[in-house]
Image (tube, grey):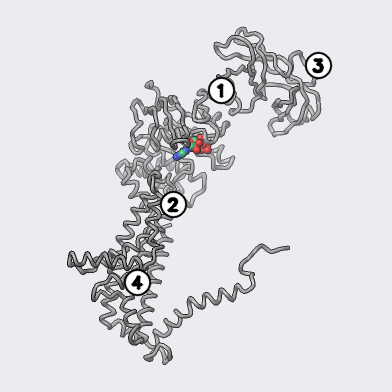
């Protein structure tokens, strides 16, 4: 691991159960998380996000592989000796203590002097804007407030790494948006490394420095939000982050990093090829719905993707057009709505989609 | 429109319910009433008086038996609750292990074994120990009471632990609490109402026992229930009613105190 890494997960596997019932909840994962980074684990339910987090926290121990913290192997260190704190999915606030006592608990267990604890607790209460409720029991405050107390409790001992397991999933939409901004602010102010778990791709894109996309116990791609969105490593990532159209076709030729692909539904696309890609043959092109435009089939340029408009769904900021292609598959185009302009197309219209230059990407197929 | 099923609307429900309540509480009401009888009889009412309470309080045998009962109940409930707490922790706070179901069954089986069987078994075993050691103190009764109190103490503690989020103990460990300190600062305070309930239950069960006590006790070791049983075979005066009433009052106080304490804790 390099000196800039806060956490290094080296070839970690965690197997639950025995015999035929064995599941590798985490399957040979290797990943490094940099200091001061807002790092997000994103993946569908059951893909092993919580398990990976619990391995880092020390509630579970790897079946094989090692976990490094700040240059030291902590694979066998119990949780109470790791300078890592967790914000639990259900907050796990101590119900028999007040807000203040909850926040001060970590420092008390570290045997810090009373005066220091009081000072630090006051600072934390201010940070999460909970000064007014310091003396309340934790079952007498709202969900959003509990979330903030859980955050303050985990931040109070100034850990090297903060683990957050879907901390916002129980909140309503508006509060969730507010807390997202608040979390970003806290991370910037404290400079602590955040490892954040979510299965909400929008949340991951807006908050993270880097995202690791997980599926079935493995990490499929690690990269900045732009990288995983614009250049998904494979079919799964393309489908999981944002909406995308997957179009099968045949690569005719590759030049200057651009592949010319004849689509099996008709039409031709210039797709950005992955680094080092050469050769032809069958391939899949991925295209984001907002990177195409609809026009009437009559007068469409050569190579446009032709079809029949099945439905147009109004979404407020934009309209989603679902186009039925020649082979019966669905192709989505998303266009931004303008004031006082009615939908341009209606169900049953013969339409064609034109793709913006350098917007389509060729997927690297995994064996 | 058809009304949803409501057992209270079934024909005869009220009659059956009233009959059950009457059967349960009427004898107790009669018993308590006659504790205040001025006369010698438990059947003829002759006016209100506290004479039988005074008589019971001045009866050396009653006092002696009461003190013994309280000693046994306190000791047995304390030991049983401690053991039950440890057992509950061992059956809920460890990774699943082979024989966990068997442990659970073994802990609860005493609830199903007929008391008379336990009594005879203990009588035989203790008789041998008495012969071998010559010891005839209260230890036998305390041990016997502890044994049958454990499952009663175990149930509420176990229920409390089952309802307790495991993440709370993880959170404590996450916040630098060693296992011992996590237990002291998080598990124990949250478990406290369960432990208290277990203790109260064990205490009342022990206080009330006749069958096992009757078999196990050595000479001169009357507890309040066995003393009362002995008296009932001879003359019956309202003094028995007075003792029973005091007993009932004590139980009510114990349960009420527990209720108030546990409600304040939550
Ligand atoms: N203690 C355990 N014993 C057995 N299997 C487990 C255990 N913990 C997790 N698993 C299994 O490991 C897999 C990954 O679980 P994990 O909780 O890490 O998923 P997750 O990505 O956090 O899902 P979610 O988004 O639903 O929280 C699941 O198939 C789960 O059933
Ligand atoms: Mg999870």
Asked if badges 4 and 2 are on one and the same chain, I answer yes
| Depth check, front residue: A144 or A306 | A306
Give SS at disc 4. Answer: helix
Residue A216 point in image, percent of width and height: 52, 30
**Of discs 1 and 4, which sits in the foreground?**
4
| Residue contact between numbered discs 1 and 3, judged by CB atoms under 8 Å | no
Give the labeled residue for mark 4.
B211
Q: In this figure, what is the number of numbered marks?
A: 4
Label 1 crowd (10 A; few <14 / some 14-19 / many >=20): few
- In the image, residue A246 sits, relative to residue A178, either above or below, namely above
**Of discs 3 and 4, which sits in the foreground?**
4
Chain identifier of the residue bearing label 2 in the image: B
Mark 1–mark 3 distance (CA, rounded to whole Å): 34 Å
Mark 3–mark 4 distance (CA, rounded to whole Å): 101 Å
Query: Can residue A179 be spotted in the picture?
Result: no
Label 3 crowd (10 A; few <14 / some 14-19 / many >=20): few
Instruction: Please give the name of the residue rendered at 44% of the width and 48% of the height, measured from the top-left corner.
Output: B165
Give the labeled residue for mark 2.
B162
Mark identifier at residue A226? 1
Chain identifier of the residue bearing label 1 in the image: A
Q: Earlier in the sequence, mark 1 or mark 3?
A: 1
Instruction: Please give the name of the residue rendered at 39% of the width and 66% of the height, measured from the top-left corner.
Output: B114
Give the labeled residue for mark 3.
A299
Quadrant position of residue A84: top left
| Residue contact between numbered discs 3 and 2, judged by CB atoms under 8 Å | no
Asked if badges 1 and 3 are on one and the same chain, I answer yes
Mark 4–mark 2 distance (CA, rounded to whole Å): 33 Å
């Amino acid at each position: 691991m390099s000196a800039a890494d806060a956490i290094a997960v080296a070839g970690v596997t965690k197997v639950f159960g025995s015999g035929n019932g064995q599941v590798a909840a985490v399957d040979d994962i290797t990943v490094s998380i940099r200091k001061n980074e807002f790092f997000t684990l994103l993946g569908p339910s059951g893909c092993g996000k919580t398990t990976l987090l619990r391995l880092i926290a020390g509630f579970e121990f790897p079946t094989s592989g090692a976990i490094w913290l700040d240059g030291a192997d902590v694979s066998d260190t119990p949780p109470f000796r790791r300078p890592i704190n967790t914000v639990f999915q259900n907050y796990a606030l101590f119900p028999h203590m007040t807000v203040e006592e909850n926040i001060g608990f970590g420092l008390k267990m570290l045997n810090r002097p009373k005066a220091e604890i009081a000072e630090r607790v006051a600072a934390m209460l201010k940070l999460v804007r909970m000064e007014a409720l310091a003396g309340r029991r934790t079952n007498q405050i709202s969900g959003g407030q509990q979330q903030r107390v859980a955050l303050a409790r985990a931040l109070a001992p100034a850990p090297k790494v903060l683990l957050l397991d879907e901390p916002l999933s129980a909140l309503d939409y508006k509060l969730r948006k507010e807390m997202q901004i608040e979390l970003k602010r806290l991370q910037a102010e404290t400079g602590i490394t955040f490892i954040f778990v979510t299965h909400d791709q929008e949340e991951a894109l807006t908050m993270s420095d880097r995202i690791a996309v997980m599926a079935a116990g493995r990490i499929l791609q690690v990269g900045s939000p732009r990288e995983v969105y614009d250049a998904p490593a494979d079919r799964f990532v393309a489908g999981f982050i944002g909406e995308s159209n997957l179009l099968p076709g045949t690569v005719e030729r590759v030049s200057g990093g651009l592949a010319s692909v004849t689509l099996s539904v008709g039409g031709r696309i210039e797709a950005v090829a992955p680094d080092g890609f050469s050769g032809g043959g069958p391939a899949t092109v991925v295209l984001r719905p907002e990177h195409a435009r609809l026009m009437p089939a009559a007068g469409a340029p050569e190579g446009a993707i032709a079809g029949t408009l099945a439905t147009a769904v109004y979404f407020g900021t934009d309209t989603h057009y679902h186009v039925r292609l020649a082979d019966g598959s669905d192709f989505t185009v998303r266009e931004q709505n303008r004031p006082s302009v009615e939908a341009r197309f209606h169900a049953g219209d013969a339409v064609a989609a034109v793709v913006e230059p350098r917007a389509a990407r060729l997927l690297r197929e995994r064996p | 429109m058809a009304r949803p099923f409501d057992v209270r609307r079934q024909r005869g429900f009220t009659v059956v319910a009233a009959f059950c309540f009457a059967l349960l509480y009427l004898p107790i009401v009669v018993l308590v009433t006659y504790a205040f009888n001025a006369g010698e009889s438990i059947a003829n009412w002759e006016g209100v008086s506290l004479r039988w309470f005074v008589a019971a309080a001045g009866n050396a045998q009653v006092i002696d038996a009461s003190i013994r009962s309280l000693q046994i109940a306190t000791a047995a409930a304390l030991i049983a609750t401690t053991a039950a707490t440890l057992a509950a922790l061992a059956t809920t706070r460890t990774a699943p292990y082979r024989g966990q179901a068997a442990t659970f069954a073994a802990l609860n089986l005493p609830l199903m074994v007929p008391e008379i069987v336990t009594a005879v078994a203990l009588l035989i075993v203790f008789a041998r120990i008495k012969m071998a050691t010559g010891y005839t103190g209260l230890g036998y009764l305390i041990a016997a009471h502890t044994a049958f109190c454990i499952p009663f103490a175990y149930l509420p503690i176990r229920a409390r632990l089952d309802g307790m989020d495991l993440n709370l103990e993880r959170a404590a460990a996450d916040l630098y609490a060693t296992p011992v300190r996590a237990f002291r600062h998080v598990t124990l305070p949250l478990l406290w109402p369960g432990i208290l309930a277990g203790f109260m239950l064990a205490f009342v069960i022990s206080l009330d026992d006749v069958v096992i006590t009757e078999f196990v006790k050595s000479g001169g070791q009357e507890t309040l229930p066995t003393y009362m049983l002995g008296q009932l075979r001879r003359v019956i005066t309202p003094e028995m009613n007075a003792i029973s009433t005091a007993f009932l009052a004590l139980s009510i106080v114990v349960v009420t105190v527990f209720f108030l304490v546990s409600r304040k804790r939550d």
